[in-house]
Amino acid sequence: MPPAAGPGPSPGTAATPDLVVFSGLPGSGKSTLARGLAQRLLAAGRPALWLRIDTIEHALAASVLRIARAEDAGYLAAQGVARDALALGVSVVADCVNPWPLTRDQWAALAPATGARLTELEITCSDVAEHRARIEARHAAGEGPDWAAVEARDWRPWRRPVPRLDTAGRPPDAALAPLCAALGLA
């Protein structure tokens, strides 16, 4: 494992970077919201990186190693990239299912190690029909799991309280508004 990067920018020299960790089942709206948040950070003049676990895992599967089940490799790679970005003062918007306490705790430990401000949240879609329609449309397009795989996903409840954003019946801007306000982007 490479040596850990030092803490993020010191107060007064640069803005404290944010580490915003999205979690939720496939099709809940994580990627739409995470991409939108990264765009808003950038538009506000705050350097930001949208870090999508799916992109990393797809790259691992396409590599010469043909890693079909990335398991923890995608998360560890993403956390390494996040550590480097945060150390430079770049905010990171981590877009991942993040289904277990182990992965959640790894993200949470990264914030104090880099001097970043941590925001964790769970994205849900409480309308089962809407959620299923999203999954089926993506699956039909060759992207992502089918509905049965989403229902069978090993999802563990959070052990600590985190804000929940429900995307059911809401346009992305409306779902994202409370988070943007909390990050001073309103």
Image: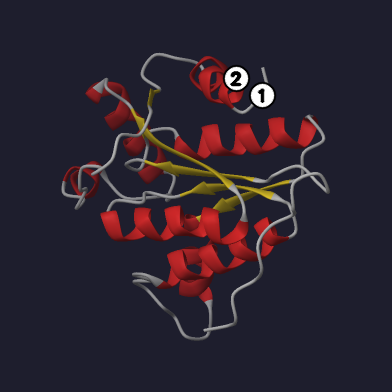
Above or below residue 143? Residue 120 is above
- Report if the CB atoms under discs 2 and 1 are less than 8 Å apart: yes
- Protein image colouring: secondary structure
Q: Secondary structure at mark 1?
A: loop
Q: Residue at x 18, y 45 (%)?
A: 148
Q: Secondary structure at mark 2?
A: helix
- Residue bearing the label numbered 2: 181
Front residue of 175/115: it is 115
For residue 43, the mark is none
- Horizontally, residue 94 falls left or right of residue 147, namely right
Give the image location of residue 133, x and y in percent. 32, 28
Q: Residue at x 46, y 69 (%)?
A: 76
Question: Residue 130: which quarter of the image?
Answer: top left
Give the image location of residue 40, x and y in percent. 70, 30
Mark 2 vs mark 1, CA separation in Å: 5 Å
- Horizontally, residue 154 falls left or right of residue 146, namely left
- Residue bearing the label numbered 1: 184
Q: Residue at x 75, y 59 (%)?
A: 88
